[in-house]
Image: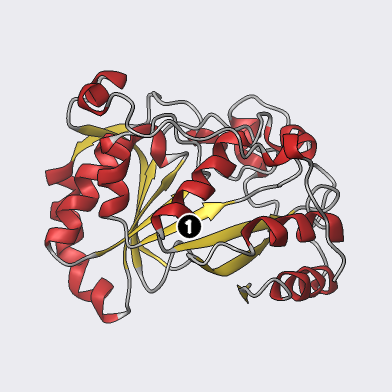
Amino acid sequence: MQAFTLTPEQQAKDIKPRIRAKADNAAGHRHYQGKGIVHSIESCGTVDGPGLRYVLFLQGCLMRCLYCHNRDTWDLHTDKAQELTVGQVMKQVMAYRHYLRATGGGVTATGGEPLLQYEFVRDWFTACREHDIHTCLDTNGYALHYDSILDGLLDHTNLVMLDLKQIDPDIHKVLVGIPNTKTLNFARYLSERKQPARVRYVIVPGYTDDERSANLLGEFIGGMENIETVELLPYHELGAHKWALCGDEYKLTGVHPPPKETVLKIKKILEGYGKNIIY
């Protein structure tokens, strides 16, 4: 297999997350008052982790993905968002717990980017695990702080679903609007923790559907034993209308879902790096 090696600058392995530098003062990072800012709730989700899932869509995201299908979750505060306590959310979760368990499901925190509200997710997941409910964190890996709060969240997370959008830093910045340094550092941190994880990779024509991009992804995650599965997600246009509702231009108009042949090509490449592929 041909090797596609990142430059030392791209690997940025000398950039290590600062782990618990001031853990005792971690709560001072944010003004958390015991509530989560929620965009919406899906009581029986089927695409956000294993089995049937209670899915909490949280507000706030710092990435600006060109293909984002939840454009209305970017802002942390909106008129339509609701603030909920862990107790309020758990009351709903407990009503569904038998259905969730029967299907091998559980709960999922997504968004937006749930790590922007990591105190709330930590408290929610802690409550879920006390009732033996499976927890899943659906994240782009944009962790702002490495501290006791993040560790507490991950300690109560059964599965991390990590969106690795593009390993090439230049393409990533065009596609997402910001560098991928934080995301790659988070992936490395999960690997160090041996945290069970699934990578999600969106196949966007013209941005992530080429062989080089697939090989870069495979090379990056190939040695990460905590990642057993890669989920391939063909690009779709289902969220384009939300951009107009938010007063923004959808810049991928005219871009269509990739053909099945492209998905199978990427599947074969990533299987060559020892990963199970689902799509």
Give the colour scheme shown: secondary structure
Q: Is residue 243 above or below residue 199?
A: above
Q: Can residue 250 be seen?
A: no
The part of the image, by quadrant, that contains residue 82 is top left
Q: Is residue 121 above or below residue 233?
A: above
| Closer to the camera in the image, 186 or 8 | 8
Picture residue at 83% right of the left edge, 49% below the top: 255
Q: Can residue 27 be seen?
A: yes
The part of the image, by quadrant, that contains residue 87 is top left
Residue 225, image x and y in percent? 52, 67
Q: 10 Å neighbourhood of mark 1: few (<14), some, or many (≥20)?
A: many
- Residue linked to disc 1: 161
Residue 18, image x and y in percent? 43, 30
Residue 77, image x and y in percent? 39, 23
Picture residue at 46% right of the left edge, 47% below the top: 189
In the image, is 153 to the left or to the right of 130? right
Question: In what quadrant of the picture does the N terminus appear?
Answer: bottom right
Picture residue at 58% right of the left edge, 28% below the top: 246
Question: How many callouts does the rendering have?
Answer: 1
| Kind of residue indicated by mark 1 | Met
Picture residue at 51% right of the left edge, 31% below the top: 74
Q: Secondary structure at mark 1?
A: strand
Residue 35, image x and y in percent? 21, 32
Q: Residue furthest bottom?
A: 102
| Closer to the camera in the image, 77 or 216 | 216
In the image, is 205 to the left or to the right of 237? right
Question: In what quadrant of the picture does the C terminus appear?
Answer: bottom right
